[in-house]
Image (cartoon, helix red, strand yellow):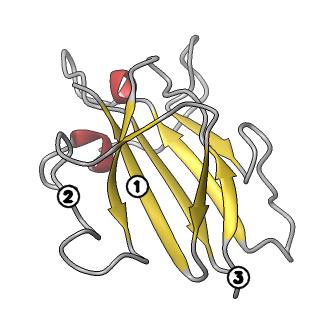
Amino acid sequence: LRKAHPVFRRRTFFTAATPGTPEILWHGVQPVQPDFSTTSRRLAFALDGRRCDRPDVVDRDFYVAMNADDHAENFQIPASPSGRPWRRVVDTALASPDDFQDVDQGPEIAVMSTYPVQARSLIILASSA
């Protein structure tokens, strides 16, 4: 994923200096409710593919939800920053070959649905091109 998508290979650090949608949107188990406390074991974020730091390059949006707790947690899936539908690309709790799928082949994940992120695992969703 990293080689194929410039949104994962930024040349500059995320900044809020540019007006409009931020490059990174922080979430928790609920959209736009991140828990940055020292006891939190769950965090999610979305990267806006329109805001990668390369001129004239538009990438897919990506959503990453991480669960470091010892039990599964349901994450409510936010809309992608560009409004495009999500597809699951990675779920580290699944057995191979279902744990990683091509960005256009994974199952579609509905906005505002809940997705169970298993204990000590993560998921990555990619927007449509």
Residue 55 lies left or right of residue 107; in this view the side is: left
Residue 116, quarter of the rendered image? bottom right
| Residue drawn at 73 percent across, 53 percent down | 29
Specify the quadrant that holds the C terminus.
Answer: top left
Which numbered disc, 2 or 1, marks the residue closer to the eye?
Answer: 2
Residue 27 lies left or right of residue 108; in this view the side is: right
Relative to 74, is 40 above or below?
A: below
Count neighbours of disc 2 (C-alpha within 10 A) and say few if under 14, some if 14 to 19, many if 20 or more: some
Q: Position of residue 38 (x, y in %)?
A: 85, 74
Residue 92 lies left or right of residue 74; in this view the side is: left
**Helix, strand, or loop for circle 2?**
loop
| Residue drawn at 55 percent across, 30 percent down | 111
Q: CA distance from mark 2 to mark 3?
A: 24 Å
Q: Position of residue 54 (x, y in %)?
A: 23, 28
CB contact under 8 Å: marks 2 and 3: no
Residue identifier under label 2: 101
Closer to the chain start, of discs 2 and 1, is: 2
Q: Amino acid at mark 1?
A: Ile
Closer to the chain start, of discs 1 and 3, is: 3
Which numbered disc, 1 or 3, marks the residue closer to the eye?
Answer: 3
Q: CA distance from mark 1 to mark 3?
A: 19 Å
